[in-house]
Image (tube, rainbow, N blue to C red):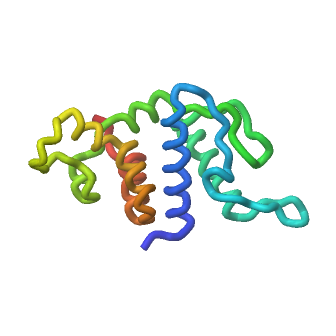
Amino acid sequence: MADLHVEEFHKDAAIALTQLYGAFPRRVNLFVEDIAGPDEPDEFGLHSKRHMACLGALLWLGEEGLLRYVDTIRQEALDQAVLTRAAFIRLSSPAPASVGRELGQTGEDTADGTPPSVQEDLSTHIHLIRTALRSGNSSRISQIMQTTFFSDSR
């Protein structure tokens, strides 16, 4: 079992990348509360560890070259965030077939008459991430995010 903070990181990254992919190529403000949920700063104005972990995940995505942004809006959001070219290509590309089969999400072995072009769209990293997020299964989200981050590009 993965550490809870790593599973939360994978989920935060998945949500952020999905939001940015849906807005691509527009620049958008990426709000921590939209990803990690509502947060009320304490009496000293400090955010919760969960909120700060999500902000840290967003900043890490930027440091690793998956997104660009103009600035932070306090500790609330990334201002004018957009996917990088590398992230857009990765998310749009098909995941390894073995991952899709393990997750039960590719049509490669189906005989339902689904056209190959649709099967390919259903096997992209972004589709697998969206499907994993809809499932709410932390293990599935972590698995597809690890594949997205670490598998070789086609």
- Whether residue 55 is visible to the viewer of this picture, yes or no, is no
Name the spot of residue 82 as percent of width and height, x first.
57, 32
Residue 106 position (above or below residue 73): below
Residue 69 vertical position relative to residue 41 in the rendered view, above or below:
above
Image quarter for residue 133? bottom left
Point out the image quarter for the N terminus. Answer: bottom left
Left or right? Give the position of 29 relative to 107. right
Residue 76 placement, left or right of 125: right
In the depicted view, which residue is nearer to us: 17 or 148?
17
Residue 102: x and y in percent read 24, 59
Q: Residue furthest right?
A: 44
Name the residue nearer the viewer: 80 or 152: 80
Residue 105: where, in percent of width, then height? Answer: 27, 53
Q: Residue at x 28, y 58 (%)?
A: 103
Q: Quick check: 50 above or below 153?
A: below
- Quadrant (top left, top right, bottom left, bottom right) of the C terminus: top left
Residue shown at 90% from the left, 63% from the top? 44
Relative placement, left or right, of 107 versus 121 is left
User: Residue 140: x, y in percent?
Assistant: 38, 61
* Quarter of the figure with residue 122: top left
State whether residue 101 appears in this view. yes
Q: Residue furthest left?
A: 111
Among the 4 quarters of the image, the one containing residue 19: top right
Tally of numbered discs: 0
Relative placement, left or right, of 7 versus 137 is right
Q: Residue at x 55, y 45 (%)?
A: 16
